[in-house]
Amino acid sequence: MTAISTAETRPVGASSLAAQIETAAAAIEATVIAWRRDFHAHPELGNREFRTAAIVAEHLQRLGLDEVRTGVAHTGVVGLLKGGLPGPVVALRADMDALPVAEQVDLPFASKATAPWNGETVGVMHACGHDCHTAILMGVAQVLAGLRSQLRGSVKFIFQPAEEMPPEGEDGGAKMMIAEGALQYPVPQAIFGLHVTSRLPVGFIGYRPGPTMASADSLKITVQGRQTHGAAPWLGVDPIVTAAQVVLGLQTVVSRTQDLTQEPAVVTLGTIRGGLRDNIIPDSVEMRGTIRTFNEAMRDDIHERVTTLAESIAQGSRASCQVCIRKNYPVTINDPALTEAMVPTLQRVAGPTGAESGLLLVPKVTGSEDFSFFQRLVPGLFFFIGVTARGIDPAQAPSNHSPRFAVDEDGLKLGLRALAHLTCDYLEARA
């Protein structure tokens, strides 16, 4: 499908359903929290969200949605709610998968689950908050289904698997959902998504127009030497020393070749594997890492420089080197016009928090999101909901993906209200 033109900039005000949304959100808050706790206690890894997807699909069917598709991109669910009045189409997305992380949070509903992941048995935890996202969107579906007769337009609910990447050798996630028609029949004019974060206190919403979250690319470098006895290194080619030089050389790719006044970038190596004994120089060393950027031209330039530098260092050491870079997720870019139009809604939903507004313009995030694939085709707005408990410094709170990541569940209602108001404000303004 072809990309949709950028969103209109006409100002968006509160919809006629605003008061009813508030009443319904308050009434369903406890249910949303109960859903979240159930999902948290029963997490599932990417492309294996069978239980979660079944609960979501049953809920949407019970609400009487006009269409509920299951098995999209393996375990994804797409529901369509047609309002009683004519109008545009809005899509809402939540991700459902957990992470291969063993939970260390003391909760009565803490995860004790384990599962196979890339050949290993691992602990499984909703360490990124996707349990919250799924429960929130189920709540939004219930609120909006209750307002169906007054709803101007249609709402597409996208429950997505494998945002955290599918297992090796499998396809999945947003890209696969798009390929299987998640954004078609009907095509939405806008898409909204959210992410809970420990970087903000509960009660706060964070947003940013334009590039918001980084692209994410996988990096694998294999240095091939020649094995020999550690007592006679001159009889072989040492891939460990060569790999060390590559590691140091890669530190200059960002710091000495990129204009960081324009956009930040990150090149990180996370694993190095090579050798079995202390007195044997091995044949090869493998390094794996990640590359993060906020600009496609910079992204391609860094890829080229990483490859050239690693190969050149290896050649100078009489070793060989294979560099494999796989593009995973594009930059998450919030449509500037759509974001500008919807900021009044977010301001109204967040309201004042103490002496300041509950809506914050946040810095760029070097984490990534495959919501970016949806935004390549539909004007999108992706924002953040604070879930760090009051009295805790968010800078000190365990981050998303930590085994100690903790959620103040007061944030769930704020996320529900934000998505419901964004939807109805947009539909009514564009109808």
Image: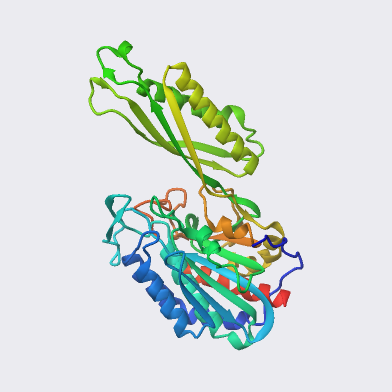
Q: State the scheme by which the image is colored.
A: rainbow
As drawn, 238 above or below 218: above
Q: Of residues 45 and 347, which is closer to you in this image?
A: 45
Task: Answer with the quarter of the image where residue 131 lies.
Answer: bottom left
Whether residue 26 is visible: yes
**Which quarter of the rendering shows the N terminus?**
bottom right
As drawn, 216 above or below 32: above
Q: Of residues 404 and 276, which is closer to you in this image?
A: 276
Whether residue 353 is visible: no
Query: Would residue 158 appear left or right of 335 to someone viewing this image?
Result: left
Task: Answer with the quarter of the image where residue 13 lies.
Answer: bottom right
How many marks the image carries: the answer is: 0
**Which quarter of the rendering shows the C terminus?**
bottom right
Q: Of residues 293 and 31, which is closer to you in this image?
A: 293
Q: Of residues 345 and 130, which is closer to you in this image?
A: 130
Query: Would residue 232 appear left or right of 90 to someone viewing this image?
Result: left
As drawn, 57 above or below 266: below
Residue at 40% across, 34% down: 287
- The picture places residue 315, in percent across and down from the top left corner, at 47, 19
Q: Residue furthest right?
A: 10
Residue at 38% across, 20% down: 241
- The picture places residue 78, in percent across and down from the top left corner, at 51, 72
- The picture places residue 217, in percent across and down from the top left corner, at 51, 43
- The picture places residue 336, in percent across and down from the top left corner, at 70, 57
Residue at 62% across, 72% down: 90
